[in-house]
Image: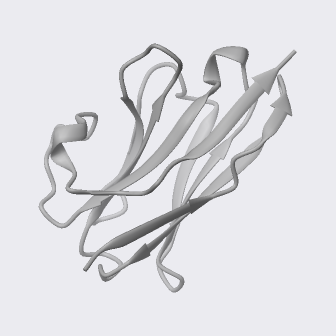
């Protein structure tokens, strides 16, 4: 059974940094694809960053250059370092993972396993 546990959400001021953590249980590091999604108020869930089984990373346009996704294989944890946070980054952030890796990393339908979400609120 796969379980994803996110943590690190908080309320922060704009231009600050925050790091989210996703602990992956049930998959072996290097044998799954992981991703971070977010869903703002009244918006659809959107993929923002992904990490494949080989360690390659992908970013969506709104976060490219500001967010960094990384993995600690020993701990089997995926991180999302968020820098220069903006008001529009306010959302519930979700971690997702699947051992059937799809090339369309940005689609929620490509992941069978999800965390419970962690809230990030950015204020001015």
26 on left or right of 9: left
In percent of the image, x 69 and y 47: which residue is there?
9
What's the residue at 42%, 16% (across, down)? Answer: 43
Determine the residue positioned at 70% across, 55% down.
8
If the image is split into quadrants, where does the C terminus sit? top right
Instruction: Say which quarter of the image contains residue 12.
Output: top right
- Residue 49: percent from the left, percent from the top? 43, 40
Q: Measured along the vertical axis of the image, is residue 106 above or below residue 116?
A: above
Q: In which image quadrant can residue 55 be found?
A: bottom left
| On screen, residue 71 above or below 41 | below
Q: Which one is nearer the viewer's eye here, 45 or 72?
A: 45
Residue 16 in sight from this viewpoint:
no
- In this picture, is 29 found above or below 46? below
The N terminus is located in which quarter? bottom left
- Report the number of discs: 0
The picture places residue 107, in percent across and down from the top left corner, at 23, 34
Nearer-the-camera pick, 9 or 21 = 9
118 to 15, vertically: above or below: below
Question: Does residue 52 appear in this view?
Answer: yes
**Is 71 placed left or right of 81 in the picture?**
left
Q: Picture coordinates of residue 79 (x, y %)?
A: 57, 58
Horizontal and vertical percent position of residue 84:
76, 28
* Side (left or right) of 54 relative to 19: left
Which residue is nearer to you in this view: 76 or 95? 95
The residue closer to the viewer here, 102 or 3, is: 3
For the rendered model, the colour scheme is one colour
Q: Give the left or right position of residue 67, taking residue 114 as reference.
A: right
Q: Residue at the location (25% across, 68% down)?
A: 32
């Amino acid at each position: 059974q796969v379980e994803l546990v996110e943590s690190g959400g908080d309320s922060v001021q704009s231009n600050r940094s925050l790091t989210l953590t996703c602990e992956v249980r049930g998959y072996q590091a290097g044998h799954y694809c992981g991703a971070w999604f977010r869903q703002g108020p009244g918006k659809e869930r959107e993929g923002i960053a992904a990490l494949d089984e080989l360690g390659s990373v992908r970013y969506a346009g709104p976060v490219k250059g500001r967010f960094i996704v990384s993995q600690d294989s020993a701990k089997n944890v995926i991180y999302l370092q968020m820098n220069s946070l903006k008001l529009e980054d306010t959302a519930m952030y979700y971690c997702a993972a699947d051992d059937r890796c799809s090339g369309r990393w940005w689609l929620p339908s490509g992941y069978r396993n999800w965390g419970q979400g962690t809230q990030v609120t950015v204020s001015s």
